[in-house]
């Protein structure tokens, strides 16, 4: 067997855009013959997949799976919503979501896990589907929550199939109380998170740079005030800010007369034990991805001019 060097793998990767491990495997299968390795990758659909990898994939599905005291959410992107309605794509996302339960929130670990019923790892299986379906697809991110006792409730918004939709939410409630009551309340709370999109549980969980930015805005609005007055203004302003972005301080969407913290306290009577809201996760499909906006009129004009 030919000695496959790192330089050969790098060269093949640059020629095809395929993954490092796929290039190494291709060279091994072809005894180091570069042209044969390129053909090997093309035959497997991996080179073709690589050519599509530069295209923006901002559609797709968010998958959610809950199992007792643990739950996971995963986002798998495609280029178009049409693919997201494809049963094969939906099956793939559902299977990846199940695997995410054991990935402990690590996307890299998830990508290396064996895909059920396949000889490929998740990343390679997705690449194979890229070649089959004809669109760029990516496993973008995953997260999980767990509690020692209680429930991790979930909610999927715009659901297209069980556990699959456009927004996926997990809410971790720790309690020794009645599981059925916790689940019912947890689902309502997850719906609140989907609608209100909080940044953190409380001010302590808001990123430092975000808080500093809010303080700077308050300071600029009240420039010239005495220092002791400014401190009170900033403290008051942050309290108002917390009511907007901190889950525990937000007005509960199912009863605007109370905060989420008050709703959690009140449900303890039904649950029969103290309830602690330990955390939440909210995945919205395509959140943070810069989508390409096509100027159709410009395209038509360009075509008409022969450019």
Image (cartoon, rainbow, N blue to C red):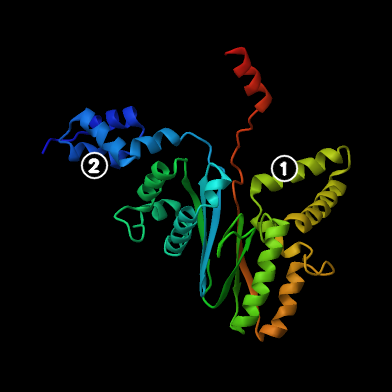
Question: Quick check: 85 above or below 180?
Answer: above
Give me the residue at 70% from left, 84% from top: 270
**How far separated are the C-alphas under marks 2 and 1?**
49 Å
Residue placed at 31% from the left, 39% from the top?
A: 20
**Which of the two residues, 124 or 278, is positioned nearer the viewer here?**
124
Residue 22: x %, y % from top left: 29, 41
With 233 as the anchor, is 45 left or right in this view? left
Q: Nearer the viewer, residue 63 or 162?
A: 162
Q: Nearer the viewer, mark 2 or mark 1?
A: 2
Percent from the top left, x then y, of residue 72?
Answer: 51, 63
What's the residue at 21%, 31% (across, down)? 36
Residue occupied by mark 2: 25
Q: Return the residue found at the far bottom.
A: 272
Q: Secondary structure at mark 1?
A: helix
Q: State the residue position of label 1.
A: 213
Q: Residue furthest front?
A: 304
Q: In the rendered view, does 18 fall on the left or right side of 225? A: left
Which mark sits nearer the N-terminus, 2 or 1?
Answer: 2
Query: Residue 294's image quarter?
Result: top right
The answer to which quarter of the image holds residue 158 is bottom right
Foreground residue among 103 and 194: 194
- The x and y percentages for residue 216 are 76, 41
Circles 2 and 1, Cβ within 8 Å, touching? The answer is no
The mark found on residue 307 in the picture is none
Counting other residues with Cα less than 10 Å from the Cα at mark 1, is it few (<14), some (14-19), or many (20 or more)?
few
Residue at point 70%, 48% (across, down): 211
Residue 22, compared with residue 249, is above or below; it is above
The local secondary structure at tag 2 comes to helix
Q: Position of residue 279 (x, y in %)?
A: 61, 64
């Amino acid at each position: 067997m030919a000695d496959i060097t790192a330089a050969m793998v790098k060269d093949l990767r640059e020629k095809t855009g395929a993954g490092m491990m796929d290039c190494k495997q291709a060279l091994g299968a072809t005894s180091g013959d570069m042209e044969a390795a390129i053909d090997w990758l093309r035959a497997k659909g991996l080179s073709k997949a690589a050519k599509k990898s530069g295209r923006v994939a901002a559609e797709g599905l968010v998958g959610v799976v809950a199992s007792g005291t643990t739950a996971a959410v995963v986002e798998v992107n495609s280029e178009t919503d049409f693919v997201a309605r494809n049963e094969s794509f939906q099956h793939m996302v559902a299977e990846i979501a199940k695997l995410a339960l054991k990935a402990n929130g690590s996307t890299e670990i998830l990508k290396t896990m064996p895909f059920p019923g396949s000889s490929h790892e998740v990343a390679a299986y997705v690449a194979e589907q890229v070649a089959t379906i004809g669109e760029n697809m990516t496993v973008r991110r995953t997260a999980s929550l767990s509690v020692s006792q209680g429930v991790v409730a979930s909610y999927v918004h715009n659901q297209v199939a069980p556990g699959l939709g456009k927004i996926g939410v997990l809410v971790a409630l720790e309690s020794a109380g009645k599981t059925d009551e916790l689940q019912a309340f947890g689902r309502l709370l997850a719906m609140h998170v989907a609608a209100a999109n909080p940044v953190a549980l409380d001010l302590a969980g808001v990123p430092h740079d975000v808080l500093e930015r809010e303080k700077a805005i308050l300071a600029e609005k009240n420039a010239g005030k005495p220092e002791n007055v400014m401190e009170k203004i900033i403290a008051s302003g942050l309290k108002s800010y917390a009511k907007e972005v901190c889950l525990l301080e937000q007005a509960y969407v199912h009863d605007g007369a109370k905060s989420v913290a008050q709703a959690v306290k009140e449900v303890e009577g039904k649950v029969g034990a103290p309830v602690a809201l330990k955390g939440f996760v909210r995945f919205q499909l395509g959140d943070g991805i810069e989508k390409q906006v096509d100027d159709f009129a410009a395209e038509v004009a360009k075509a008409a001019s022969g450019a």
